[in-house]
Amino acid sequence: MKISTVLQFDRAAGQMGKLTGELAQQQARISSGEAFLAPREAPQDATALLRLDALRSNQDVRLGLLDRAEARANLQESALRSVSDVLIRLKELGIQAANDTYSATDKQVFALEVRALGDELLSLANTRDAEGNAIFAGAATQGAAFARGVDGIVTYLGDSTRIAVPVGESRALLLARPGTDFFTPVTVPGAAEGTRESFFSAIDRFAEALETGGDLRGTTLAQLDSMLEGSSLALARVGTDLSAVNQQREILSEERLQTDALISDLRDLDFAEAITKLRADQLALEAAQSSFARIAGQSLFNFLR
């Protein structure tokens, strides 16, 4: 087989071009810090990374939902604590007004405070989050949860939707509950069995009883006790939600750390190994260039001298 000078040059140039390309790729890997630049370099690792990236995105979404649930629950907890404080003050007024030593004028003064406290409760029931969403309106978060009509009666404007958000493979948390779960209707003592009235109607009834000299012991105090009990249950429910959020966040955070570690193992470059290979590629290229220079300098005339 005859080996021409052109063939020798082509083979040498091709070898040096291949070594130069490998050296450039290795330099690009070191610059990017990634183990491979294209999926074809490591098909199995690239496929695994796609799955892990999707898993991490899902974990980020679930953590975001937990943040929303926590923020809402914290606001609800704060508002409900204030509601409990107002109800305690209302009960104090009820106990005082039930004492026959107070005159009708004194009870009129009490009634003014009761109505003011009722307005404060209405304001707390319409608490909104940082985005302007009503936190006690179920899923109807754009408008007010409760409103007082022209007839003076407070009605619930939210809906009865309960929104559960998935936070695990088999677990969900309630992100939204109806406002009537927090400001629960109360039984009307002395009325037909099962007769109930709204939370705010009971407050109005209390004020009217003070203004008209109505019964406070048999009706108002019993309803206030029921309201306080309902407020305590609502607080306990919110506290349970917050506890579940914190527990689930710890689980998800640990899962996220494990996912990040797996992604790092597959994607991140081993710099010590990469630099060693870079030096080897540089030496191979230098050797190829040196050999080519010696071969290119040889000719038949050199042997004839």
Image (spheres, rainbow, N blue to C red):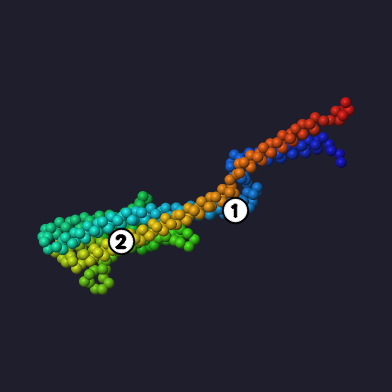
- In the image, residue 280 above or below residue 245: above
Left or right: residue 301 versus residue 172 is right
Left or right: residue 144 versus residue 44 is left
Residue 90 position, x and y percent, is 21, 59
Give the CA distance from mark 2 to mark 1. 49 Å
Q: Quadrant of residue 118?
A: bottom left
Left or right: residue 25 versus residue 98 is right
Provide the residue designation for mark 2.
232
Identify residue type, mark 1: Ala
| Along the viewing direction, whichever of 243 and 44 lies nearer the viewer | 243
Mark 2 or mark 1: whose residue is earlier in sequence: 1
- What element does badge 2 sit on? helix
| Along the viewing direction, whichever of 293 and 249 lies nearer the viewer | 249
Provide the residue designation for mark 1.
48
Q: Quadrant of the C terminus?
A: top right
Mark 2 or 1: in front is: 2
Residue 72 position, x and y percent, is 37, 54
Q: Residue furthest right?
A: 304
Q: Residues within 10 Å of mark 2 (few under 14, many from 20)?
A: some
Q: Residues within 10 Å of mark 1 (few under 14, many from 20)?
A: few
Identify residue type, mark 2: Ser
- What element does badge 1 sit on? helix
Q: Quadrant of residue 186?
A: bottom left
Q: Quadrant of the N terminus?
A: top right
Residue 290 position, x and y percent, is 75, 32
For image coordinates 63% across by 49% down, the residue present is 39
For image coordinates 16% across by 58% down, the residue present is 110
